[in-house]
Image (spheres, rainbow, N blue to C red):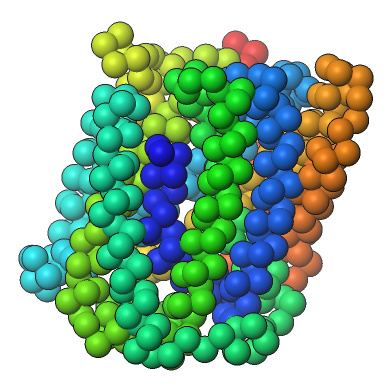
Amino acid sequence: MIAMGSLAPSVSMSMAPLGVWYLAGNGTWLVFVLTIVCMLGVAICIAAFARRIVGTGSIYSYAGHVFGRPGRVFLGACLVGGWGCLLLISVPMLVLYGSPFMIAIGGPAAGGDLAQLVVTGAVMLFGCLLAIRGLAASVRVMYVVVGVSMPLAGALLIAAALNSGVDLGAQLSLQGVSVSSIARGLPLGFALLLGFEGSAALAYETRDPRRWMPRIMYGLLLAFFLVFLVGTFLQVPVFNAHAADIRAGVSPLTVLGDAAGAPWLATAASAALFVALVGGNMGIISVAARIFGTLALDGLLPRRLAYVSRRYKTPVVAIVVLATVRWAAPWAVMLASDRTPLDLYVWAGTLLSFWWVPMYAATCVGATLFLVRLENRIVPLVLAGGIVGCGVTLYTFADSLINPAAGALRLIPYLFLAMLVVLVAGMAIAGRR
């Protein structure tokens, strides 16, 4: 449940199509189909490790058994960069989907930067406190979050679709879609499911992890694929009709509420999604803190991040540091650049996907090598999953260099490469001390 909550299913159904539509238009559904095929290939390889190894660093722990210390340094750098980008997305999502609710209860002033800065700070503090309390408290919150937010989010999408008409023809015929637009949408499609394997970081706190971790990963992927498809088919026609407003920064919930002819429903859904984002914030911090704590224990990050509370048995320092960065960094970028939350969401999501390309590629290759060394055999399903997962992820990154997107997005691959060099060098030096 905490793994599902960290991905916030109601938010995923509402927001996942928005970011991909921003890049791929009517090809959004195809992006999600290609994404799930790739991710299932990766999941098969991760499951090969999860059934045999219990660890708290997820991919980092698994691949380290194959590639040794150099592999751990490289993958540790990718995890820091990847989870760092994932942390950047929370504030834009809160602003995009929580602003109708905040304005409804606080007036126009509640939609300003200062009010939203304070509210998002309070959300991060609340999520931080829950994460410190541990998984027992977190799971109870997740049940409430999923139970409250899903019906309202679903009602808004269905009302908007029924009132505006569900134009499946334009989507299924890929009207106005090109191969390059699908390729540009794939990184963000991956970004929406990246980190699903992070649930394995909770292995030590899960009963019978070798049995349940693979099942949890497969279940998460399939559940969110269905959620993404439903949200896509219902929302894309509305987005196409109001493209100018959305690109100008108007909350998509406001657009959906107007399309449904029920602005009040948009406010109610905004309140529910706001609650869901609070829960998702707590889930992501819980997983990320355990991964960063594992890196700290290995000497790749400051040792203080590995401190575990004697009372709650949680990595308190890592939780507090990550929650602070998660709130401050996005606001620093948005206020300094004067760009919309949607812009930051697309930028961070695209950069996020690139961090996972080498991690998933290494995992896909490592799974086959691991089984050969451990059991002296090649498992055809793992090999096939590795070929699919490794091939698609590497193609996505290569295409971003060969056919760069317009504007700031064209710089993202080069920013990733520069950051990767700096992080790998820094961790390699830290690891020798």
Q: Image point 71% across, 53% down: which residue? A: 38
Q: How many labels does the image show?
A: 0
Is residue 23 rendered to the left or right of residue 173?
left
Question: Is residue 291 at all visible to an observer of this figure?
Answer: yes
Picture quadrant where residue 217 is located: top right
Question: Is residue 410 at all visible to an observer of this figure?
Answer: no
Q: Position of residue 326 (x, y in %)?
A: 36, 43
Q: Image point 12% across, 70% down: which residue? A: 104
In front of the other: 274 or 288: 274
| Above or below, 249 relative to 358 | below
Q: Where is residue 208 in the image (x, y as percent from the top left)?
A: 54, 20
| Above or below, 132 relative to 240 | above
Q: Image point 33% across, 59% down: which residue? A: 150
In front of the other: 215 or 350: 215
Q: Image point 30% across, 8% down: which residue? A: 310
Is residue 103 rendered to the left or right of residue 56?
left
Question: In the displayed image of the protein, which residue is found farthest to the left?
Answer: 106
Q: Quadrant of the C terminus?
A: top right
Q: Quadrant of the N terminus?
A: top left
Picture quadrant where residue 209 is located: top right
Is residue 416 rendered to the left or right of residue 109?
right
| Above or below, 429 relative to 32 | above
Question: In the displayed image of the protein, which residue is found farthest to the top?
Answer: 310
Picture quadrant where residue 398 is located: bottom right
Q: Position of residue 377 (x, y in %)?
A: 91, 25
Q: Where is residue 298 in the image (x, y as percent from the top left)?
A: 57, 15
